Image (cartoon, rainbow, N blue to C red):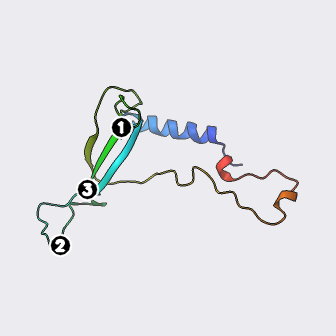
Amino acid sequence: RFCGHAEVRAYLGAFADHFGLRDVVRLNTEVTSAYPIVSESSSETGSTAALTCWGPKWRVSCAPTHPGKEATRRGEGEDAESQSEVFDAVVVCNGHYSEPRVPTFPGSEQWPGTQMLSHNF
């Protein structure tokens, strides 16, 4: 048996609560830029990034996705401008598969059963 989206969502919510992640997640936010920070010891001929155990530190700029609302934790909004912060790592989660590509192949329209992608499960 595979768990449905409601069960996965409940699991992720419990995980976030257990580890206190809801307090550090920022909602209503658009990342406008992200780039590795070059250390002060770099030269013009070859730059060296400020390294962490995961690689370079990153400067990330973000802005609220709704005008007049701050990109805040827990989705609450206040007036605010764009922000820039430094992080040890960046994970890109851009929703590449948010709109599935449905394959077509000869004979698929004659299939008597239900056809669905895992995206729709």
Secondary structure under badge 1? loop
Image side of residue 36 versus residue 26, left or right: left
Q: Residue 6 appears at what percent x and percent y?
A: 63, 37
Circle 3: residue type: Lys
Q: Nearer the viewer, mark 1 or mark 2?
A: 2
Secondary structure under badge 3? loop
When asked about the image quadrant of residue 74, the answer is top left
Point 33% across, 25% down: residue: 78
Find the residue positioned furthest to the front. 67
Classed neighbour count for the residue bearing mark 1: other residues with Cα under 10 Å, few (<14), some (14–19), many (≥20):
few
To which residue does mark 2 refer? Answer: 46
Q: Residue 37 appears at what percent x and percent y?
A: 22, 57
Secondary structure under badge 2? loop
To which residue does mark 3 refer? Answer: 57
Q: Which mark is residue 54?
A: none
To which residue does mark 1 refer? Answer: 24
